[in-house]
Image (tube, grey):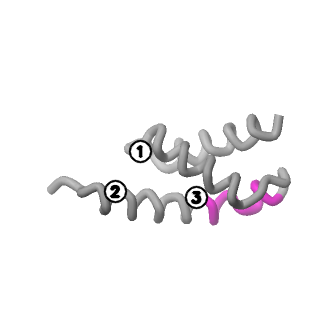
Amino acid sequence: MALSDSDTRVDGKQLCERLLTRLGGFVQGIGLSVPAAWEIVERAIADGPHADPADIEAKARAWMLIALA
C-alpha cells in the first residue's frame, strides 16, 4: 500500500520532531536557533526522504555546521 502525500508529510514531520529532539543539545551547543535547525532538518529529510534516519541526522548536523560558517 502506497503512502499518500498527507501520510508522507505526517511521517516527515514526525521524523523532523524526533531528529530535532535528538539534536537538541547539538543545536543549543552551536548556538543555532530552533527555527533554523527545523528548516535544515526538513531540507535534509526532503533531500533523501527514504534514507536511513541516522544518515539524515548526520547530513543535518553537517549542514548546521555549514550554516554557521
- Above or below residue 19? Residue 55 is above
Please give the range of residues in magenta.
Answer: 20-28
Label 1, label 3: how far apart the Cα atoms are: 13 Å
- Secondary element type, mark 1: loop
Within 10 Å of disc 1 (Cα), the crowding (few <14, some 14-19, many 20+) is: some
Query: Which residue is nearer to you in this view: 35 or 61?
Result: 35
CA distance separating discs 3 and 2: 16 Å
Q: At label 2, which amino acid type do we have?
A: Thr
The answer to whether the residue labelled 2 contacts the one labelled 1, judged by CB atoms less than 8 Å apart, is yes
- Image depth: mark 3 or mark 2 in front: 2
Asked whether residue 9 is drawn in magenta, I would say: no
Residue picked out by circle 2: 8
Q: Which is nearer the N-term, disc 2 or disc 1?
A: 2
Name the residue at 60% across, 39% down.
59
Q: Secondary structure at mark 2?
A: helix
Q: Residues within 10 Å of mark 2 (few under 14, many from 20)?
A: few
Circle 1 is placed at which residue position? 49
- Give the mark nearer the N terminus: 3 vs 2: 2
| Proximity of marks 1 and 3: CB atoms separated by less than 8 Å | no
- Where is 14 relative to 68, above or below? below
Is the residue under label 2 in contact with that under label 3 (CB below 8 Å)? no
Lateral position of residue 56 relative to residue 50, left or right = right
Q: Amino acid at mark 1?
A: Pro
Judging by the rendered image, the residue that carries numbered circle 3 is: 19
